[in-house]
Amino acid sequence: MTSLRRRIRSIALFEQLGPGLVTGAADDDPSGIATYSQTGARFGYGLLWTLLLTYPLMSAIQLVSGQIGRVTGQGLARNMAAVIPPWAVTGLVALLFAANTINIGADLAAMGAAGQLLAGGGAHLFTIGFALASLLLQMFVPYKKYVRILKWLTLVLFAYVAVALVVKLDWTAVARGLFIPDPRLFGSKEAITTIVAVFGTTISPYLFFWQSAQEVEEVAHDPKAKPLKQAPSQARPELKRLRLDTFFGMAVSNLIALAIMIATAATLHASGQHQIGTAADAARALEPAAGKFAFLLFALGIVGTGLLSVPVLAGSAAYAVGETRGWSCGLDHKPWEAVGFYAVIGAATVLGVAIDLLRIDPIKALFWSAVINGVIAAPMMVVLMLVVSRRDQMGRFIAGPLMKTFGWLATAVMAAATLAMVVVLATGD
């Protein structure tokens, strides 16, 4: 009986996990895997502290995003339009679309390289195949089933935790890397750029739009649910569910990121390989746990997280563009019911494939897409914090002192990291 009750509670807990868990898992996309791998290989345990810092900050900003959607029943772009001029909203959405498209191209290229690593043949053919699969999934799989698929895809990420558990670790160095930043790194052009990349792939603008939009979709999908501004009686259980979902999803995201960074530090960096140039180089970090199956494990991780993240990237861009244009938006709609929405998804995916055909190095493209996300995140975060603080938009559900503190802190940290990168790049080491 006790075992049955535990199982029921576990199922009930998992059922509460939706937008936050999927958002957290999508955060560890191929771009994230490449960035964390590059960081561990280049700097060893020296930048582990970035992930300790990002957890409360990313949790706060994702809570802000989710709460805006759940309270107002509208996505971020429509809420942003009440705070800043239309031209500014259009500019931010255009930056989001551009960054997402580059990110999609980098992710698809990495998936193609992983497919080639696993099965041989042409990487570009794999890239096109994965792009088509992702596009068809978004267009023709009902939203309810789609969410379930995304939830289960998150489990592939735990393969990286297994690697960190079996490799021999220098625990003193791990603890130092987690809690004591090395001041010498702050004058290094490469280190500062890498820090922005880690922040950018962890606290990414497309995740803001996605989680907010999915909270809106949850309301639209449930006939009993209403925006909390209209139905305050629903607030207590819904905000509790939002907090649980978000904190758990971001914890999963950071745990995986930490495992990737530790694994590459303990293997590649320790063996003198400080640069990752190919997918095969990155796959070798898994050899202590997977042996001859390292390439298989790496390929499955890249493909699994890619299939998870590409729809999030394309979908978040479509929500943002569609909301600014007043189009019908949502994955519950059939393609012919929301033509503009799905046209943006298709355009972002096709342009992503086009970027892959330019034959840009997938590993470098993944890293620099993270840097771009870091650069555009700060201005978007400023607007989000303004929205969540306005009583005329949020009613009684404006951000509390703790959420405001961590939300603005996250914004300040992202802005400071970006500014430091600009200064260091301009002046050199």
Image (cartoon, rainbow, N blue to C red):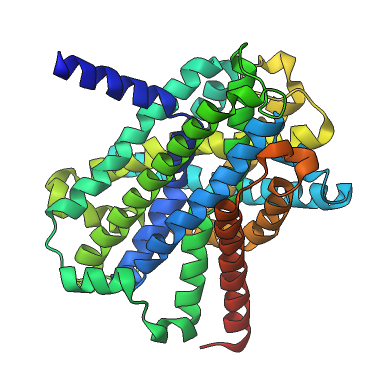
State the residue at coordinates (68%, 53%). Answer: 385
| Observer able to see residue 355 | yes
Q: In front: 341, or 143?
A: 143
Q: Is residue 165 above or below residue 108?
A: below
Q: In front: 173, or 124?
A: 173
Residue 183 sits in quarter: bottom left
State the residue at coordinates (61%, 67%). Answer: 412
- The location of residue 423, given as percent across then percent down, is 62, 82
Q: Quadrant of the N terminus?
A: top left
Asked if residue 53 lies left or right of residue 343, the reply is left
- The location of residue 68, given as percent across then percent down, is 66, 39
Residue 49 sits in quarter: bottom left
State the residue at coordinates (43%, 36%). Answer: 244
| Observer able to see residue 362 | no
Q: Is residue 34 above or below residue 74?
A: below
Asked if residue 417 lies left or right of residue 302, the reply is right
State the residue at coordinates (64%, 27%). Answer: 216
Q: Is residue 328 above or below residue 211?
A: above
Q: In front: 130, or 54?
A: 54
- The location of residue 254, given as percent across then percent down, is 38, 51
Asked if residue 79 lies left or right of residue 149, the reply is right
